[in-house]
């Protein structure tokens, strides 16, 4: 194929992020319930003489343009498996906050994989694509799959979950990002400091919440709000204490639940319906506690080719 191919990929929020103890390999076992939401990046692959990257969007300046970019790494991994050169121009139209705890880089990796597979005619199987995703990063398989899913292991072993409805979300995007590894390190440090210990022997095995899975199945936003949890939230708040003001502003405006999204610093607010979401968004904007406010809903599908 010589015409450009575009893939559209959603962001995620973790409705449950239960973090186990630090494993000897430096990772943590997780019970990670991902929900894909309607903020999207688009990755366009065009034939080129060599691997080249361009990025547009408000956060474009924070995205690396070299081979460390997850989209470039994904294209290279696919090309290597198929014994071809990764000659492609990848253009990322970025709408997902960078380093915001919403899996923006993961979305770009999944999008680059799908788009390059179509452009190069490599015809990778779904299993092969998922394997490449898992090799590149724990959150990337979910960007491909979308919807709602439980991630075990370090988050990459996915089981799709049923949902009975659409949930309304407001996201408060912070100024500047948080490094995911730094937030995990802070989580371990806080656990050590509390005296409970941070190793896999000290921390209970993370398990998905039955109440949360039920709420997702029935589409009950109030029940979901009562069950959401994020073990990384204390660490994100410790590194960025001002996030407490953002969470409070959303809660005061009537959000059913207020939580840090993944490793943060984006904060997520669950609302009863579209009108309630607009009220929460208005209050968050007026509070001056965040850079931008986004209203959306989910679950939405995972990475898809545009026009396919
Ligand atoms: P997660 O929620 O999966 O922990 P995140 O949303 O917090 O991730 P990303 O937006 O994926 O964070 O960015 C994390 C870091 O990854 C960035 O600071 C950037 O240096 C690097 N990065 C590599 N590729 C990309 C990409 N395509 N888009 C954004 N950041 C990227």
Image (spheres, grey):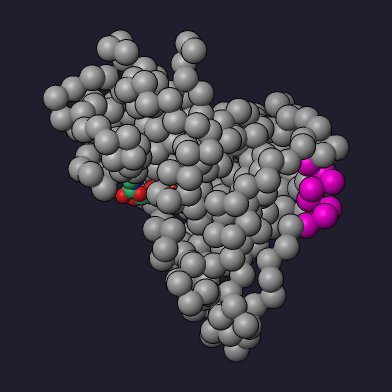
By secondary structure, the bulk of the magenta-drawn segment is best described as: helix
Is residue 197 shown above or below 50? below
Q: Quadrant of the N terminus?
A: top left
Q: Which residues are magenta?
A: 209-216
Is residue 39 shown above or below 160? above
Residue 12, x across and y down, in percent? 56, 41
- Asked if residue 248 is among those painted magenta in the image, a careful observer would answer no
Q: How many marks?
A: 0
Toward the bottom, the furthest residue is: 195
The structure residue drawn at horizontal position 77% and vertical position 35%, both measured from the top left corner, is: 163
The structure residue drawn at horizontal position 79% and vertical position 48%, both measured from the top left corner, is: 213
Residue 79, x across and y down, in percent? 29, 35
Residue 291, x across and y down, in percent? 43, 41
**Residue 148 in sight from this viewpoint:** yes
Query: Of 43 and 224, which appears nearest the observer?
Result: 43
In-image side of 218 versus 254 (left or right): right
The structure residue drawn at horizontal position 45% and vertical position 71%, both measured from the top left corner, is: 26
In-image side of 1 versus 180 (left or right): left
In-image side of 182 versus 35 (left or right): left
User: On the image, which quarter does residue 220 sit in?
Assistant: top right
Toward the front, the furthest residue is: 83
Is residue 123 shown above or below 128? above
The structure residue drawn at horizontal position 47% and vertical position 20%, both measured from the top left corner, is: 305
Query: Of 259 and 109, which appears nearest the observer?
Result: 109
Residue 145, x across and y down, in percent? 58, 35
Is residue 234 shown above or below 70? below
**Residue 100 in sight from this viewpoint:** no
């Amino acid at each position: 194929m010589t015409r450009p191919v575009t893939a559209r990929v959603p962001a995620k929020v973790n409705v449950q992020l239960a973090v186990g103890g630090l494993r000897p390999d430096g990772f943590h076992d997780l019970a990670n319930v991902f929900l894909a939401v309607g903020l999207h990046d688009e990755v366009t692959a065009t034939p080129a003489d060599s691997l080249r990257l361009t990025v547009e969007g408000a956060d474009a300046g924070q995205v690396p343009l070299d081979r460390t970019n997850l989209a470039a790494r994904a294209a290279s991994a696919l090309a290597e498996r198929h014994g071809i050169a990764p000659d492609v121009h990848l253009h990322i139209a970025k709408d997902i906050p960078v380093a915001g705890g919403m899996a923006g880089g993961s979305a770009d990796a999944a999008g680059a994989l799908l788009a390059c597979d179509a452009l190069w005619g490599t015809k990778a199987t779904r299993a092969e694509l998922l394997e490449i995703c898992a090799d590149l990063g724990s959150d990337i398989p979910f960007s491909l799959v979308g919807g709602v899913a439980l991630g075990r292991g370090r988050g990459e072993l996915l089981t799709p979950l049923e949902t009975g409805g659409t949930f309304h979300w407001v996201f408060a995007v912070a100024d500047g990002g948080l490094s995911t590894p730094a937030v995990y390190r802070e989580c371990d440090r806080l656990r050590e400091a509390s005296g409970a210990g941070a190793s896999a022997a000290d921390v209970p095995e993370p398990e998905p919440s039955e109440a949360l899975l039920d709420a997702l199945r029935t589409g009950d936003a109030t029940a979901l709000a009562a069950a959401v949890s994020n073990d990384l939230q204390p660490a994100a708040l410790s590194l960025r204490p001002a996030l407490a003001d953002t969470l409070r502003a959303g809660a005061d405006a009537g959000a059913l639940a207020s939580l840090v999204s993944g490793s943060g610093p984006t904060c997520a607010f669950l609302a009863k319906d579209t009108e309630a979401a607009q009220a929460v968004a208005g209050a968050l904007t007026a509070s001056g506690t965040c850079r931008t406010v986004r209203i959306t809903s989910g679950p939405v599908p995972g990475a898809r080719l545009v026009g396919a």
